[in-house]
Image (cartoon, rainbow, N blue to C red):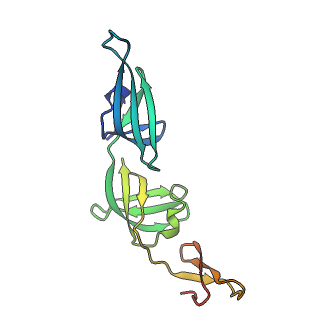
Amino acid sequence: MSKMISSFQIEKEMTFKFENKFYKCIELTLILGGIFSRNINHAKVVAKRIMDGAIVEMTFYRNESVEQIDLIESKMTFMYDDGDNLCFMDPDTYDMIEVSNTKFEWEKNFLTANLEVSCLVCENEIIKMSLPDEVCLTLSSCAEIDHSKPFKTAVCETGLKVQVPLFINAG
């Protein structure tokens, strides 16, 4: 469940959403207004951006707010790609979650039916997906052999193009 909070209420290890990006607070410093002031003037936050892991420094002032969120890490099973959306199922609750094809454009090259992936979920929306270390893909076609090159282009069942040795065939 998410709720809007003052930027001065951010705490260490808290996850929050700011300007449509998701962050996890690593370090927080509250800065007082002046030498004799007890009022907080601004907050400096060092946070990790969840989507790409980048560490960013942000400064928040008195009237700024962020959305506190709860991220749940769960295992999801990839079911199918309907052309517009990728469909995942939670194996514990059998809830189905659809995600736009454009959100995980690179990852969809490795998704096959019933593949289990790790996902960060926020309010029934998949924020981030981690593929397993290894996936097994079938080659659907291979290019003609050109003996002047040591490799040929092959297309996997997901549409991913890879370079393979000349002796590898489709299937």
Q: Is residue 147 left or right of residue 21?
A: right
Q: Residue at x 35, y 39 (%)?
A: 25
Residue 162: quarter of image? bottom right
Q: Is residue 153 left or right of residue 135?
A: right
Residue 165 image position (x, y, % from top left): 59, 85
Q: Is residue 90 left or right of residue 98?
A: left
Q: Pick out the residue farthest to the bottom.
A: 167
Residue 114: quarter of image? bottom left
Q: Is residue 99 visible?
A: yes
The N terminus lies in which quarter of the figure?
top left
Residue 141 image position (x, y, % from top left): 61, 83
**Between 72 and 48, which is closer to the camera in this rendering?**
48
How many marks overall? Answer: 0
Residue 108 image position (x, y, % from top left): 51, 65
Q: Is residue 3 visible?
A: no
Q: Residue at x 63, y 82 (%)?
A: 151
Q: Residue at x 53, y 68 (%)?
A: 109
